[in-house]
Image (cartoon, grey):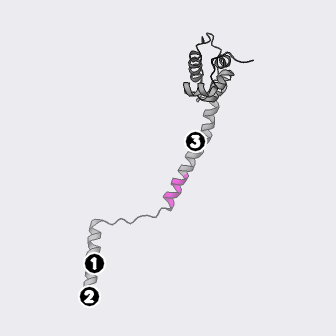
Amino acid sequence: MTSKLKEAREKAGYTVEEIAETLKIRRQYIVNLEDENFQDIPGQVYVEGYTKIYYEFLNLEPPQENKITIQKPRLIGDEEAVINKKYIIIPAILILIGIIGVYSVFKAPEEKVTEEEFIQNTINANGNNEEAIN
């Protein structure tokens, strides 16, 4: 059984490629619309928009009933998704704390020299050099 869109397209003498180029819709989406395979078109808005554009192009009356439906994607806030995130986030935090702890234990302490000590060391070094020269 051929669809209403496919029959109208063939009757008007267009190929799928010509329709796709003219309407700027992927060829595969045109085929999906003709076969009423809406699951392969990414989103309800696209299905409705492409259908409207295609029907108008072929001078057909768009279907009044809302029979064009696709399955809705899984919600981001699903309980299952939240539980799975916990199993990733908690170990990641523990590993990060462990790395910071190991770094702080093995980090060599830096010697801090005050300005006065630096001046005194410089004077002593210069004094030793003068004695070595004489």
- Camera-nearest residue between 113 and 61: 61
Above or below residue 53? Residue 84 is below
* Dots 3, 1 in contact, CB < 8 A: no
**Residue at the spot x=69%, y=17% of the render?**
3
Q: Examine the structure image and report whether residue 102 is included in the region drawn in magenta.
A: yes
Of badges 3 and 1, nearer the viewer stands: 3
Label 3 CA crowd tier, 10 Å (few <14, some 14–19, many 20+): few
Name the residue tied to disc 2: 133
Give 134 or 36, whichever is nearer the viewer. Answer: 36
Name which quarter of the figure residue 77 lies in: top right
- Please tell me whether residue 52 belongs to the stretch shown in magenta: no
**Residue assigned mark 1:** 124
Q: Residue at x 57, y 41 (%)?
A: 89
Image coordinates of residue 41 in percent, x first then y, are: 62, 26
- Inter-mark Cα distance, 3 to 1: 56 Å
Q: Which residue is denoted by mark 3 in the rendering?
A: 89
Q: Is residue 29 left or right of residue 126?
A: right
Label 2 close to label 1 by CB (< 8 Å): no
Mark before the other along the chain sequence, 2 or 1 = 1
Q: Look at the numbered disc 2 and give the secondary structure of its residue.
A: helix
